[in-house]
Amino acid sequence: MDGLLIGIAVGVLSGVVVGVVAGLTVMACKHPKSYEKLYGALLIILLGALAGGTFWDLRNGVGYSRFVVIAVIIYFSFLRALPLFLARDKPVKGGDD
Protein backbone atom coordinates (compact mmCIF):
# COMPACT_ATOMS: atom_id res chain seq x y z
CA MET A 1 0.00 0.00 0.00
CA ASP A 2 2.86 2.37 0.78
CA GLY A 3 4.37 1.83 -2.66
CA LEU A 4 1.07 2.77 -4.30
CA LEU A 5 0.85 6.02 -2.33
CA ILE A 6 4.44 6.88 -3.15
CA GLY A 7 3.75 6.21 -6.83
CA ILE A 8 0.69 8.45 -6.78
CA ALA A 9 2.62 11.21 -5.00
CA VAL A 10 5.48 11.02 -7.50
CA GLY A 11 3.01 11.13 -10.39
CA VAL A 12 1.21 14.16 -9.00
CA LEU A 13 4.48 15.96 -8.26
CA SER A 14 5.78 15.19 -11.75
CA GLY A 15 2.61 16.61 -13.28
CA VAL A 16 2.91 19.79 -11.23
CA VAL A 17 6.56 20.24 -12.24
CA VAL A 18 5.76 19.73 -15.93
CA GLY A 19 2.87 22.20 -15.65
CA VAL A 20 5.04 24.86 -14.01
CA VAL A 21 7.82 24.47 -16.58
CA ALA A 22 5.30 24.60 -19.44
CA GLY A 23 3.70 27.72 -17.95
CA LEU A 24 7.06 29.44 -17.58
CA THR A 25 7.93 28.50 -21.17
CA VAL A 26 4.70 30.02 -22.48
CA MET A 27 5.25 33.10 -20.32
CA ALA A 28 8.78 33.53 -21.70
CA CYS A 29 7.46 33.33 -25.27
CA LYS A 30 4.34 35.47 -24.92
CA HIS A 31 5.45 37.97 -22.24
CA PRO A 32 9.24 38.30 -22.29
CA LYS A 33 9.33 41.46 -20.14
CA SER A 34 7.32 39.77 -17.38
CA TYR A 35 9.56 36.70 -17.57
CA GLU A 36 12.60 38.98 -17.31
CA LYS A 37 11.25 40.27 -13.99
CA LEU A 38 10.54 36.74 -12.73
CA TYR A 39 13.91 35.40 -13.88
CA GLY A 40 15.84 37.08 -11.05
CA ALA A 41 13.73 35.40 -8.38
CA LEU A 42 13.92 32.05 -10.19
CA LEU A 43 17.70 32.31 -10.40
CA ILE A 44 18.04 33.04 -6.67
CA ILE A 45 15.83 30.06 -5.79
CA LEU A 46 17.70 27.74 -8.17
CA LEU A 47 21.12 28.87 -6.94
CA GLY A 48 19.96 28.13 -3.39
CA ALA A 49 18.81 24.70 -4.54
CA LEU A 50 22.16 24.20 -6.25
CA ALA A 51 24.05 25.04 -3.06
CA GLY A 52 21.80 22.79 -0.97
CA GLY A 53 22.05 19.96 -3.49
CA THR A 54 25.82 20.26 -3.58
CA PHE A 55 26.09 20.01 0.19
CA TRP A 56 23.66 17.08 0.19
CA ASP A 57 25.69 15.30 -2.49
CA LEU A 58 28.97 15.89 -0.67
CA ARG A 59 27.50 14.59 2.58
CA ASN A 60 25.97 11.46 1.05
CA GLY A 61 28.61 10.73 -1.57
CA VAL A 62 26.20 11.04 -4.50
CA GLY A 63 26.55 13.58 -7.28
CA TYR A 64 23.42 13.80 -9.39
CA SER A 65 21.12 16.46 -7.95
CA ARG A 66 23.39 19.39 -8.76
CA PHE A 67 23.44 18.39 -12.44
CA VAL A 68 19.66 18.49 -12.57
CA VAL A 69 19.63 21.97 -11.03
CA ILE A 70 22.33 23.16 -13.43
CA ALA A 71 20.27 21.84 -16.36
CA VAL A 72 17.21 23.75 -15.08
CA ILE A 73 19.26 26.94 -14.72
CA ILE A 74 20.52 26.55 -18.29
CA TYR A 75 16.97 25.98 -19.58
CA PHE A 76 15.55 29.02 -17.77
CA SER A 77 18.47 31.11 -19.05
CA PHE A 78 17.70 29.89 -22.56
CA LEU A 79 14.10 30.99 -22.08
CA ARG A 80 15.36 34.42 -21.10
CA ALA A 81 17.15 34.68 -24.47
CA LEU A 82 14.28 33.09 -26.42
CA PRO A 83 12.79 36.39 -27.69
CA LEU A 84 16.10 37.10 -29.43
CA PHE A 85 15.88 33.77 -31.25
CA LEU A 86 12.22 34.22 -32.14
CA ALA A 87 12.56 37.85 -33.25
CA ARG A 88 10.74 38.42 -36.46
CA ASP A 89 10.27 41.61 -38.45
CA LYS A 90 8.72 43.43 -35.48
CA PRO A 91 10.75 44.28 -32.37
CA VAL A 92 9.27 43.36 -28.99
CA LYS A 93 7.21 46.22 -27.55
CA GLY A 94 8.17 47.58 -24.16
CA GLY A 95 4.66 47.20 -22.71
CA ASP A 96 3.81 43.58 -23.48
CA ASP A 97 2.36 42.96 -20.00
Image: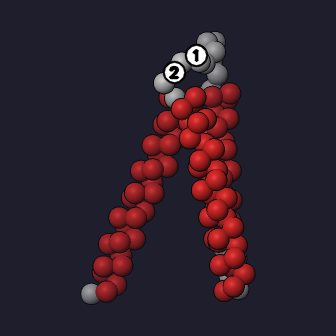
Asked if residue 3 lies left or right of residue 18, the reply is: left
Q: Are marks 1 and 2 in contact (CB under 8 Å)?
A: yes
Mark 1 and mark 2: Cα distance apart in space? 6 Å
The amino acid marked with disc number 2 is Asp
Q: In this picture, is 63 found above or below 66?
A: below
Secondary structure under tag 2 reads: loop
Q: Residue at x 65, y 71 (%)?
A: 53
Q: How many marks?
A: 2
Q: Position of residue 43 (x, y in %)?
A: 64, 50
As helix, strand or loop, the secondary structure at mark 1 comes to: loop
Residue drawn at 72 percent across, 81 percent down: 58
Which quarter of the figure has residue 5? Answer: bottom left
Mark 2 closeness class: few <14, some 14–19, many ≥20 residues within 10 Å: few
* Image side of residue 18 versus residue 77, left or right: left
> Is residue 29 something that shows in the picture?
no
Instruction: For residue 58, say whether it is visible.
Output: yes
Compared to 93, does 82 lie above or below? Answer: below
Residue receiving disc 2: 96
Q: Which mark is residue 3?
A: none
Q: Quadrant of the N terminus?
A: bottom left
Picture quarter containing residue 11?
A: bottom left
Residue topped by disc 1: 93
Q: Disc 1 marks which amino acid?
A: Lys
Residue 24 is situated, as x and y percent measured from the top left of the image, at: 50, 43
Identify which residue is drawn at 32% across, 72% down: 8
Q: Is residue 41 above or below residue 80?
A: below
Name above or below for residue 35 compared with residue 71. Answer: above
Residue, far left:
1
Residue 42 x %, y %: 59, 49
Of residues 52 and 13, the one nearer the viewer is: 52
